[in-house]
Image (spheres, rainbow, N blue to C red):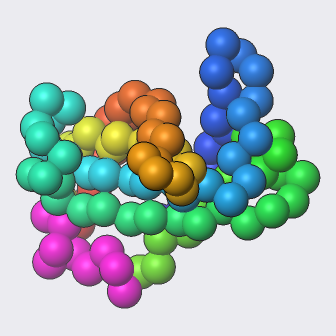
Amino acid sequence: WTFLGQFTLDGVPVDITGQVIKILLKNNATDADAARIFEYDYNVPAGADATNGLATIVVPSNLTPASAIPPADYQMKVQTVLAGSPPVVQSYGYQKITVSA
């Protein structure tokens, strides 16, 4: 799976350098995060893309075996996480994603 995303707040790109992009697949947007079907964390490297809120996330195929994620429609929750105590978490809502056989 490959995702290309631009992170903005009020239409302005957000610098995501050094942040973690967290992707959660859930059956329903209302399901608790603990009930996720799949989770992947991507560490954003420094660079012009990150400064402009852009990230290309490639989820390795060995992490998404067909047996682990049955074909269906899912809700994909996207967050950025900035390390700290406590961490700063920004949610960017949900997108429908379809997994095919």
Answer above or below: position of 24 versus 92. below
* Left/right of residue 20 with respect to residue 41 in the rendered view: right
Residue 39, percent from left and from top: 30, 62
Give the residue drawn at x 19%, y 46%: 33
Main secondary structure found in the magenta portion: loop
* Left/right of residue 7 with respect to residue 91 in the rendered view: right
The range drawn in magenta is 62-70
Residue 17, percent from left and from top: 74, 54
User: Is residue 68 in the magenta section?
Assistant: yes
Q: Nearer the viewer, residue 8 or 28?
A: 8
Say how many tags the image has: 0
Residue 93 seen in the figure: yes
Residue 56 seen in the figure: no
Indicate the quadrant containing the C terminus: top left, top right, bottom left or bottom right.
bottom left
Q: Nearer the viewer, residue 97 or 16?
A: 16
Q: Nearer the viewer, residue 70 or 30?
A: 30
Answer above or below: position of 30 versus 72. above
